[in-house]
Image: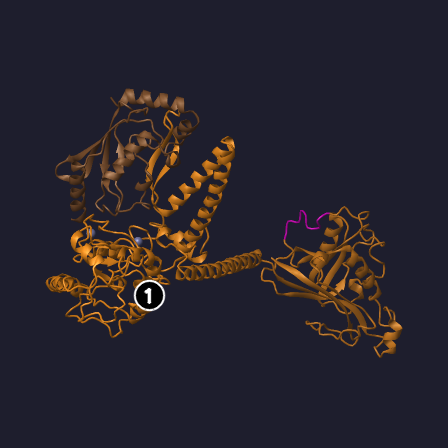
Amino acid sequence: MSAATNFNFSVIVIPSAVRSAAANLDFPTLNQSLSFALEVSSPSDFQTLYSEDTKGGNTFKGLLYVPDLDPSDPCDNHDLVPRNVTRKANLPMDDLKLVAYAPLITQHCSRQYMYSAENDNVAAFIFYGVPAKYSNNTDPLEGEGYPFEYPVYYLDGSIGQPLMNKLSEYSANMSEVYNGFNLTEAGYDIRDYARIYAVISTKNTNPMPGLWLFLLVVVAVLLFIIGASSLLMHLFQFHYRRSLRRRIANGEVDLEGLGVGRITVPREFLAKFPLYVYIAENGGQTTPPRQKVQDTTAPTTQPVPKEEGRRKERVKIPSAVVVKEGVSIVIPATITAERKSKGKERVKEKPRSPTAIDATTSPEMAEVSTSKGLTLSSPTTPSTTSRSSPKVQYSSTPSPQPRGTQTPTTTSPPHPRGYHQTSCPICLDDFIHQETTVRELPCLHIFHPECIDPYLKSQSSLCVLCKQSCLPKGYVPIRLTNSIVRRERLLRSIRERSREVATATAANNGGNNGEGGILWRWRLRRLRRQEQDLMGRQALVRVGRGRGGGFGLGPHYREQRVVEDVVRPRWRETMDRVFPGFR
Amino acid sequence: MAAVKRITKELAEFSNNPVPGVSAGLASEDNVFKWNVILTGPQGSPYSGGVFTLNLILPTEYPFKPPTLNFTTKIYHPNVSNDDKGSMCLGVLRSDSWKPSCKIVQVLEMAAGLLKEPNVDDAVETSIADEYKNNPESFEKTAREWTRKYAK
Ligand SMILES: [Zn+2]
Ligand SMILES: [Zn+2]
């Protein structure tokens, strides 16, 4: 059904000469400053009571008049309908399109008016509301069994009654209408008719378009909200990823501690960790007598040939290693220089006791080795030992010549180490003085290369002893996904809380051991458990009280591997992509 | 296989230098990854007079991964889970603090040590730990009872 959107009332002039109707009522409008015009477009002012028009978009127009009732009919209440209101008789022609106008008094009256209008050339019917004392406010169409040929509208009484009064002003000829004197003065023919002309615009009120529009708006708003929050979350995640990358680069993050898959040491890094021949700190453990000599005696010729001979016979072992690894061992110029400057003095101070030196140099060595780890990557230094004789003894000898001149071992303390290690922690075999080739990790721990290399290549990037990362600072070995970022943040907060709780627990235990202490310990335990769960490690997870729940049975535990991020439904994936970091 | 070599070496070492109160051996000759361990309750502890059997399982990644130690004899102890597993909670056996340099002997020594003196901070049975701490008499009584009941 189509509904009215707009009512327009204006005064038109119908020349008296026109006797036959122009169907389109194409008459000029009376000068508005001298007459009146009314536009009703506020939806609260009108209602569409009936319309059989389904298309909408039509306009219904015609001259406004009040249908005639029997003069004795009480419905023609003159309080409401003035006597001189425009009636059919006041219209210049019979065949003009009309718009009927009447007060909505009672159902009976409205029916009377409409029956009357049936005989007229009516385009539409407009009822208007009247004060309650005149009306019982019934629907004029109630009980009507047949469809009218014209649409029926309702106007609010506050507009309708003044309009009815206006209608009484435009029922006579030009001189008698409202403002008639000025109109004739203005040149209007006194014989012409000035009448109120109504135009009702309608539109289709098919409820669907409105609903669709509403839905569309809702969907658009939702999409906007989703898009905006997604964008915001992406921005946040981007920021988090960047900051995590920065922290990894600064070496502030224990990557392996994040429990994100397996982080291993790439071959090229592994190849840069120095390989050298093990020299006992005070060789005494393996060969006490010889060591004794070396330790105490000044340069003698005795050990030199021995060294020479040993070296020759052993040359093959490491060279095999070296060739397999594709590494030539390098003493970077920087280190040599460093040793020259720093090492010299120290060696001069205590030239006779390599053990002591080792002890004093250990912090120093950490520094050297760090720089070594980095400089080794650019083996452009000329002091590279040739491939044919890759056997190098790392030694902090001040003597710059690495080969040829046989510096007595007495003045060249063995490769200083950060730790006192005499056996391989993995296979438990003892290192053999001047024989075993060992791999030194950046943390200065040494191992058999055949023991540690496969592990670093395939299992972990951490030193098995000190759990320090073997990867160079600033190297980000994993693709930083949002889930890693989330896990890292979560872990960090759990660890922080757990630290706090631990301090609080300690403080609490110091004082009393009552309920508070138990609570704090319980909190600490819960946090630790959360941490373990998060790490995906095998954790002892409490799953409630023992079967019987009885006293003495104690809590029941079961071992459970917490697996995360393994199989996730598709929607979660999508969800994660749209709302990263949402949990 | 590196693991087998090392375990064999450790086994030989252990047989040469046994630890008092601890006896251990392979569960079956062809599998070095499974050991049977027998702990005798130390004098002066509520476990004295008891004989506790344990399973020591070594992972194939040993020594990079820690072994696991399970009591097959029921025991009332803060560090041993009170279920059919009887897993022993030992700080060094946690995979993040495990070091390959730690030998099986040392693990067994620590297990024997825990019988002498439970470690409340590493407890897996918190209620027993609390009892051990706050009500040692009642703890000892139950532990002794269980020893008499299960570890003879
Ligand atoms: Zn080794
Ligand atoms: Zn290390």
Q: Residue furthest right?
A: A181
For residue B25, which quarter of the picture?
Answer: top left
- How many marks the image carries: the answer is 1
Q: Is residue A26 above or below residue A395?
A: below
Residue A330 on image: x %, y %: 24, 68
Look at chain B in the picture and name its colour.
brown
Look at chain A in the picture and name its colour.
orange
- Asked if the stretch drawn in magenta spans residue A140, the answer is yes
| A355 or B59: nearer the viewer | A355
| A527 or A119: nearer the viewer | A527
Q: Which residues are magenta?
A: A138-146
- Asked if the stretch drawn in magenta spans residue A36, the answer is no
Mark 1 surroundings: few (<14), some (14-19) or many (≥20) residues within 10 A:
few
Q: Which residue is mark 1?
A: A345
Q: Is residue A57 above or below residue A452?
A: below
Q: Is residue B131 above or below residue A466?
A: above
Q: Is residue A227 left or right of residue B98?
A: right
